[in-house]
Amino acid sequence: MANSPQAKKRARQNEARFQVNKARRSRIRTFLRRVEEAIASGDKEAATAALRAAQPELMRGVTKGVFHKNTASRKVSRLASRVKALG
């Protein structure tokens, strides 16, 4: 348990940051789920649109420190190849 004022403040900051990152991660996962659902339904146009919407969200997560750059790039690449294969 935090005892010093500095440690108490850091605990508060960490909790606030955790909540913000949790919301960002959840939002990104929602976008990814929409792409997955469109791929599963076999609708290429919907999947393409969902991927276009998901890409900037993923990269925004990178700039905000929620994901590593390579992780986001890998996810986008794999989804794009799956959407392309729907043809």
Image (tube, rainbow, N blue to C red):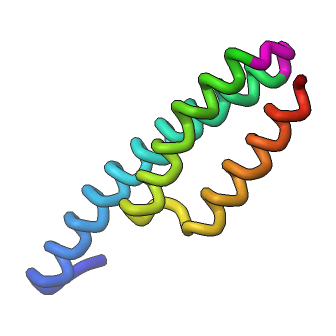
The quadrant holding residue 46 is: top right
* Residue 57 image position (x, y, % from top left): 47, 43
Residue at x 17% of width, y 74% of height: 8
Q: Is 39 in front, or is 67?
A: 39
Q: Residue at x 29, y 67 (%)?
A: 14
Q: Is residue 27 left or right of residue 42?
A: left
Segment tinted magenta in the rendering? 40-44
Task: Look at the image and tell me in which quarter the C terminus lies.
Answer: top right
Which one is nearer the viewer's eye here, 70 or 16?
A: 70
Please identify the quarter of the rendering in which residue 7 is found.
Answer: bottom left
Q: Is residue 77 above or below residue 32?
A: below
Of 15 and 4, which appears nearest the observer? 15
Q: Is residue 52 above or below residue 55?
A: above
Q: Viewed as shown, does residue 57 lie left or right of 52?
A: left
The count of marks equals 0
| Farthest residue, direction left | 5
**Residue at horizontal 61 percent and vertical 26 percent from the top:** 50
Q: Is residue 22 left or right of residue 33?
A: left
Q: Position of residue 54 (x, y in %)?
A: 55, 36
Q: Give the residue drawn at x 30%, y 77%.
A: 1
Looking at the image, residue 47 lies above or below residue 73:
above
Q: Residue 22 in the image: state x and y as whole percent.
A: 43, 48
Is 27 inside the magenta-drawn segment? Answer: no
Q: Is residue 41 magenta?
A: yes
Q: Main secondary structure of the magenta part?
A: helix
Point out residue 15 in the picture as x, y percentages from the top left corner.
30, 60
